Amino acid sequence: MNSMTASNLKSAFGGESMASMRYLQWGAFAKKEGFKNVANLFEAVAYAERVHAGNHFRELRNEVGEASVTAGAGFGMTTTSENLHGAIEGENYEIQQMYPSFLSVADMQKEKGSIRSFQFALEAEKCHSELFTKAKEDVDNGKDFTENTVHVCDICGYTLTGELEEDCPICKARVEMFTTFVTAE
Amino acid sequence: MNSMTASNLKSAFGGESMASMRYLQWGAFAKKEGFKNVANLFEAVAYAERVHAGNHFRELRNEVGEASVTAGAGFGMTTTSENLHGAIEGENYEIQQMYPSFLSVADMQKEKGSIRSFQFALEAEKCHSELFTKAKEDVDNGKDFTENTVHVCDICGYTLTGELEEDCPICKARVEMFTTFVTAE
Ligand SMILES: [Fe+2]
Ligand SMILES: [Fe+2]
Ligand SMILES: [Fe+2]
Ligand SMILES: [Fe+2]
Ligand SMILES: [Fe+2]
Ligand SMILES: [Fe+2]
């Protein structure tokens, strides 16, 4: 594998791993603040980021050894509204800057597997940004997020609320390949 | 919080987040190779690293905003023996280099919460290194890891096999605060 794409995959793995852990923390925090559906959304998206991290990690399967990894990450845990703001910022950074840049290099270097892994993540982050934006509007209006059911594609991390009726629009996986998160009563 | 300790906490958060994701991948790989107890050990230790990542993240609760994080991480997925070798190397780096260095700075800067978070992780990594070393010996002898039950302290990530009889030796949490992982049949 070309070293620049390998380095970008490692950075993306770092960013996704930290995002997954951050959302688990923000989910637990939202639960304590009484926003149960926001907590469920954070847990579902944490799982989607785990799918992305796993996809990138498996692309790196032959790059055996220790590496120093640099990646972007959001911090802080003050209010659920602020956490959702941080989540939207992080997703938009990946959508607007990180994945387009990594894809451009992977395209140039003809790294097919990496292109697929980056593309899956890029498309899924667009859903995440939208869902967090909706959730923040609800929270800023003093309400919980309206949706209590979130589905995540195990293959590409595509994330949707409501009914799961069709195969994954990103990776074409069957509905059986989705994991569903429902708010705990 | 002093900026050097904040930077070290972010780096430790990055390292723990990536370790957690890596062990989940290596666990799934071990399962496919037929090493069910190794898979269970990887899943349990992935959970312990998640505890460490969460502890570091919560210490950073007032450091709101985006940051660029640099952290060490192991890559590659070729054989379970090689993966266990990578796991031992990563744990030993944290035990011998990373956490002693971060603790030395946190001591000097009198960052009590960070000292606690780093100390919990350092002590738990010692168990991880030992458990992975035993598992690698078994795998290199053509066998699965002998232990099918692993307990992890939810507060500090302390990890042990066999019977859970006493409060946590690191953080004094009661046995009820442990999460137990048993190999799936
Ligand atoms: Fe992602
Ligand atoms: Fe995302
Ligand atoms: Fe998909
Ligand atoms: Fe750890
Ligand atoms: Fe560890
Ligand atoms: Fe403990």
Image (tube, coloured by chain):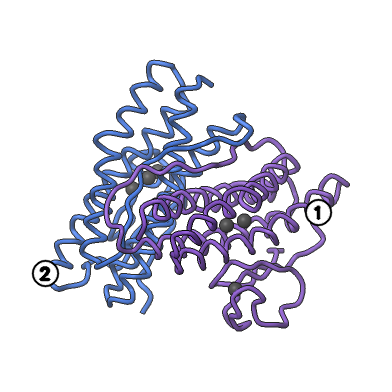
Chain colours: A purple, B blue
Instruction: Evaluate whether label 2 is on the same chain as label 1.
Output: no
Give the residue at x 36% y 42%: A68
Examine the image and state in which quarter residue B134 appears. Answer: bottom left
Within 10 Å of disc 2 (Cα), the crowding (few <14, some 14-19, many 20+) is few
Residue furthest to the left: B141
Nearer-the-camera pick, B140 or A8:
A8
SS for callout 2: loop
Within 10 Å of disc 1 (Cα), the crowding (few <14, some 14-19, many 20+) is many
The N terminus of chain B is located in which quarter? top right
Name the amino acid type tagged 2. Asn
Please report contact status of discs 2 and 1: CB closer than 8 Å, yes or no: no
Chain letter, disc 1 residue: A
Residue furthest to the right: A141
Compared across the picture, whether B81 is left or right of B94 comes to: left
Examine the image and state in which quarter residue A1 appears. Answer: bottom left
State how far apart marks 2 and 1 are (Cα): 54 Å
Tell me, yes or no, if residue B166 can be seen here. Answer: no
Compared across the picture, whether A20 is left or right of B23 comes to: right
Q: What is the x, y in percent for residue A169? A: 67, 76
Give the residue at x 63% y 63%: A124
Residue under label 2, please give it: B141
Q: What is the x, y in percent for residue B157? A: 39, 47
The C terminus of chain B is located in which quarter? bottom left
Q: Is residue A121 above or below residue B153?
A: below
Compared across the picture, whether A161 is left or right of B90 comes to: right
Tell me, yes or no, if residue A113 can be seen here. Answer: yes
Q: What is the x, y in percent for residue B51? A: 46, 47
Residue under label 1, please give it: A144
Give the residue at x 18% y 61%: B136
Q: What is the x, y in percent for residue A139? A: 81, 48
